[in-house]
Amino acid sequence: MRRWFAPGRVNIIGEHTDYNDGFVLPVALSLGVVCAAGPRADGLVRVSSAQRPGEVVEIGLDDLVAHRDRVPGWARYPLGVVHEFVRRGLPVGGVSLDLDGNVPIGAGLSSSAALCCAVTLALRDLHAPELGERAMIEMAAAAENWYAGVPTGLLDQSASMLCTAGHALFLDMRAVTASTELDHRVAEQIPFDPATHGLALLVADTGHPHDLADGAYARRRAQCESAAAALGVAALRDAGLGDLARLTEETLRRRATHVVTENARVVAVADRLRAAADPRSIGPLLTASHDSLRDDFEVSAPALDLAVSAAVDAGAYGARLIGGGFGGSVLALVDSTAVERTSARIIDRFAVAGLAAPRVFTVEPAAGARRLE
């Protein structure tokens, strides 16, 4: 069996903008999912995971839909990818998929997208080498949307597939959705190497997992669609601050306020990085993003707010929750010399609050999905 790898991702900035046709700025991580895959002659799909010892799922290709409700939640992601190949009439046969990963699950680092992208890349190489990046991104996302029941956009999969080391990836999600080719006009690689500026990206996994399949994410998405409809625009990407007063329903107005201001923050950060500005200058925009996610989009949680406050108090240039929210992780931009101090401050604040110690670690912009051997 050969092996393929796809990374998790962290957004420098740009949360809940992707499904509103907006802008995002992710980087890939060195953490990810490895898929060892090989063909089978019996027409079965066999899935195992090092993180689920003893739990092996076997299912026939013809039973993927009929027996979906019997599939445990963790296995729906890889089986959803197989289903997408079958649904599109691609010549996938029986296959064994052995999975292993080191992206913290539920931490907002896109472990599920990494899993789906690793499996998609493996099946592409084994059965459908003509598939391009655009199709693979769509298929990995569709596996999450339909088979796993999580209504994500294309952000996580695009980041996992397209990111390059030492760069942030500026994505215009409307163009990503509409384009057949993912060239520089759609997916722009912007140099971003914090270490060369004496900086580090610090992630604090609060240990409070989020579950985007529990309905809260879907409700936010539906609220954004309702706000866009009320404003008479195709998506909130098309709205401006001056339009928001027309939203008489307070919740919809606050949801739209976050999306409009977050898009502006993404563009501002991308502009500064393109201009080779000191990355420290983006710090206040990161913290403003968190404030908006907490107050207007209401997807923060006490542990996330505590981690952000502790990081900023320790001297971080900016900090914000990452991922869908409701739990998961916080990203902080800190001096390289302040990593230990900031980590200790966050851990101490959690101890004082009676919370279990978070896992705190640094990340750096890494390469996207690839075959390992």
Image (cartoon, grey):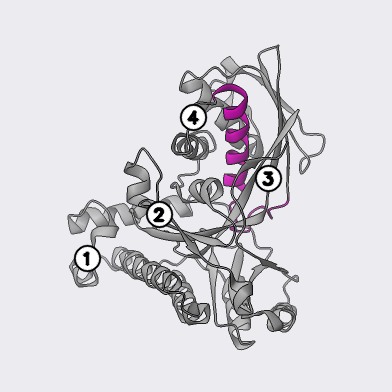
Instruction: Please rate how many residues cluster around mark 1, counting C-alpha atoms within 10 Å: few if below 14, some from 14 to 19, many from 20.
Output: some
**Residue depicted at 47% across the width and 22% down the height:** 87
Q: What residue type is labelled 3?
A: Val
Instruction: Please tell me whether mark 1 sits on a helix, a strand or a loop.
Output: loop
Q: Do the residues labelled 1 and 2 touch (CB within 8 Å)?
A: no
Q: Do the residues labelled 3 and 4 touch (CB within 8 Å)?
A: no
Quote the CA–CA distance across marks 2 and 4. Answer: 23 Å
Tell me the chief SS of the magenta region.
helix
Q: Where is residue 211 in the image (x, y as percent from the top left)?
A: 57, 52
Q: Which mark is residue 131?
A: 4
Single out the mark in the foreground, 1 or 3: 3
Q: Residue 33 carries which label?
A: 3
Return the residue at label 2: 18
**Residue depicted at 56% across the width and 31% down the height:** 81
Give the residues drawn in magenta, as a range: 102-128
Instruction: Please tell me whether mark 3 sits on a helix, a strand or a loop.
Output: strand
Q: Position of residue 218 (x, y in %)?
A: 43, 50
Single out the mark in the foreground, 4 or 1: 4
